[in-house]
Structure formats: structure tokens, C-alpha cells
Amino acid sequence: MPSFSKSISLGKELKIADEEFKLLRDFIYAKSGIWIAENRKYLLENRLANRIRLLNLKSYGEYFYFLQYDPRREVELNRLFESVTTNETSFYRNPPQLKVFQDKVLPEIIAAQRAAGQKTLRFWSAGCSTGEEPYTLAIILNEVLKGELAQWNVRITAHDLSEAVLASAREGVYNEYTLRTTPRDIIARYFIPESGRFRLKPELKRLVQYSQLNLSDRELLKRVERSHVVFCRNVIIYFDDVVKRQVIGSFYDNLLPGGYLLIGHSESLHNLSRAFKPVHHPGAIIYRKEE
Ligand SMILES: C[S@@+](CC[C@H](N)C(=O)[O-])C[C@H]1O[C@@H](n2cnc3c(N)ncnc32)[C@H](O)[C@@H]1O
């Protein structure tokens, strides 16, 4: 093994050397598009020290080597992704934007499909974390289509980089905290209480299909079924501008004409794409792919 052991062990704290930081930062970027700026070096230190200890390694350099050559590297790559991202999410996150989705976007798309004699609806939750976002979409769809939902061919495709969050999403059981901004009547209608937790009803769960996908992999993104609406909220913040532009371009190509891209409250397409038409609503800007 090359002598990477540059980390300095200060008491119990394992410090990352500049060279090790650069190697790991570039490795993470190449594998996921996630960019860790110099001033967030502490993030790698804080989050990876534990992995290094658990694997009985001595330094970040050894960890870098492990990620490339150890037989367990695929599993560890997932752990690494989980260490450098936050999976924070909740049901009914950003209610003003979801109100626009429920009151304007969905009725418009449903009316257009009806006019075309079609009953297909496709949604994509890109960076879905533990499932709260795609399941919220499933609930809203049920609220809008009501008894008619069963006659429509609906699919919500949900992707994330992390296998761990996908496993939890597939389970579909949630605590009260993640439902904190969800209306009480919605909880009563769509969840089954289970030992202090809440299980999403199977008829809604069925609408969502999960799989692992790396959003920075342009070729894989081309294979995703075309969508009426893409939700990619609070995900592009992890990427640098090169990967942001590439991912937004892939969403544009994926969207059906007249479709919409919905991004996070604190995110914007400014300087990233001029292809979309921003549509302003109270409390939310959404992005339309013109027909
Ligand atoms: C903060 S969560 C946002 C979840 C949800 N969209 C929301 O707004 O509540 C960000 C998610 O993006 C995922 N993510 C980060 N980089 C990714 C990549 N390159 N490909 C796919 N998912 C990624 C993370 O694993 C994490 O689950």
C-alpha cells in the first residue's frame, strides 16, 4: 500500500492532511458529482473519522486506498455517500410550492391528458431520500383525482444515491416528526397507526417505484422514462455548477413538452439554464418546459 499515512492523530481526533482532503474530495466528485469546498474540510473530518475507526484504518489516506482496492469497496462507497450528504426531508415540505402543484400544475396536466384522450401520468422524484417527497406526491394525486385515480396509469419514479435511504423509503413507516407539516386529516386518511409510528397505506405506496441512481451519471439519466413533472428539491445544492448544469439539462430533456421542474425553496436556475420558462406563483417559482 502507498504511504498515505499523513493524517495526524491529535488525542482522539483524526486530522485530515491537505493532500488526503484533495484526494477524497476529487474521488467523491468523480463518483457522485458532490463537491466539497475547501472550507467544508471539517465535514469530511467529522463524518469519516468514524468510518476509519470502524474499518480499523489509521488515516484518511488509507481510507482512500480502501475505497479503491478493498473487496468491500462497493459497500463502503455507499457508506461514503451517506456520510457526505444529508437526507433531511419531511412530508409536505415547502407547502406553498405543493399548493401550486396541487391547484395549478396537476389540474393543467390532467386536463391536457384528458383532451388528448390519455390517462397516463409520470412523475420523477430525483433525490427522494427516505420517501417523504414521492409519497407526498402520491397523496396529492389521490386528493386531486380522488376515486378516479384507479382508472389512471400513474407512476412516480423515485431515485437516490443512497441505498440506506431507499430501504427505509420502501418500508414506508414514519415517525410523527417527519409528518409535522402534514395536515391532520391527511394523516388520518392515508396512514395506519402502528406502535407510535405511521404506515403509509399500500394503495399509495404502490404508485412509487424506487431505485438507486446517481444523478451525475448523464447516460443513466437518459434512460429514465419521460415525465410530466420532475421534483428535484434540495439536491443540486451538493453539486458544483458544471454538474448542476448537466443535471438540469437532463431534466429538460426528460420532461414532456409543457412539463414542469420543481426545485428547492432556496435553489434557483439563475446562471444554470435559460431553457425553462420561470412561472411565478405566490410563494413559489416553478419552471416550465414550453411546448
Ligand atoms: C436533503 S435530501 C432532499 C430530499 C427531498 N428531495 C426533499 O427535498 O425533501 C437530498 C438527497 O439527495 C441525495 N443525493 C445527493 N447526491 C445525489 C446524487 N448524485 N444522485 C442521487 N441522489 C443524490 C441524497 O442522498 C439525499 O437523500
Image: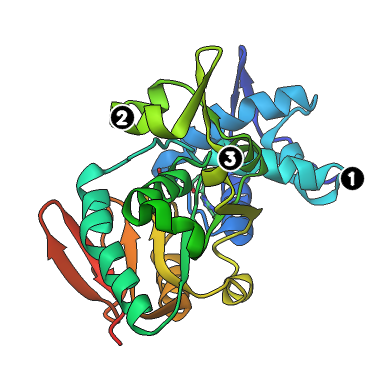
Closest to the camera, between mark 1 and mark 2, is 2
| Residue, disc 3 | 202
- Say if disc 1 is inside 8 Å of ligand 1: no
- Say if disc 2 is inside 8 Å of ligand 1: no
Amino acid type, residue under disc 1 in the picture: Pro
* Element type at mark 1: loop
Q: Residue 111: x percent and y percent?
A: 29, 73
Label 1 – label 2 distance at C-alpha = 50 Å
Residue at image point 22% right, 50% down? 99
Label 2 – label 3 distance at C-alpha = 18 Å
| Residue, disc 1 | 71
Q: Tell me the tag on residue 37.
A: none
Residues at discs 2 and 3 in contact (Cβ within 8 Å): no
Closest to the camera, between mark 1 and mark 3, is 3
Q: Nearer the viewer, residue 121 or 229?
A: 121
**Badge 1 density bin: few <14, some 14–19, many ≥20, Cα 10 Å:** few
> Which image quadrant: the N terminus?
top right
Q: Nearer the viewer, residue 217 or 34?
A: 217
Does label 1 or label 2 sit earlier along the sequence?
1
Residue at image point 61% right, 54% down? 209
Does label 1 or label 3 sit earlier along the sequence?
1
Above or below for 13 versus 82 = above
